[in-house]
Amino acid sequence: MGGFALLSSFACDTCGSPAIMLPDAPEDTSAIRCSGCGSRLGTWGEFKARARQLIIEDSGQAEAGPRRVSVDLALDL
């Protein structure tokens, strides 16, 4: 799946948009799509895992393991 190379910059490979579309009740297996062009970017679970990894890498803290970093926040859209 080519969509997750985009996560290093959070931009769609096809159109460059940084925005994603989520289903009303996203689950880890739910497909996410680019808000700009509608391209499939992967699953919500894959997106969260990559975002979690980027947060850990960006924090520069070795003690910030995956259990201390959460991207499962309630979305109030």
Image (tube, helix red, strand yellow):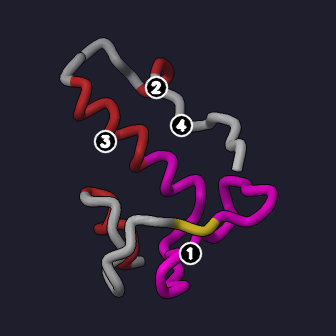
Residue annotated with mark 2: 69
Residue annotated with mark 1: 33
Alpha carbon of mark 4 to alpha carbon of mark 3: how far?
Answer: 11 Å
Residue annotated with mark 4: 71
Q: Earlier in the sequence, mark 4 or mark 3?
A: 3
13 displayed left or right of 35 = left
Where residue 3 sits in the image (x, y, percent)?
39, 74
| Occupied quadrant, residue 30 | bottom right
For residue 4, above or below residue 70: below
Quadrant occupied by the N terminus: bottom left
Q: Which mark is residue 54?
A: 3
Q: Earlier in the sequence, mark 1 or mark 4?
A: 1
Label 4 with label 2: CB-CB less than 8 Å: yes
Disc 4 residue type (three-letter) = Val
Mark 1: secondary structure: strand
In this picture, which residue range is highlighted in magenta? 22-49
Classify 10 Å Cα crowding around label 4: few (below 14), some (14-19), many (20 and above).
few
Q: What's the residue at 31%, 77% (across, down)?
A: 16
Mark 4: secondary structure: loop
Asked if residue 3 is among those painted magenta in the image, a careful observer would answer no
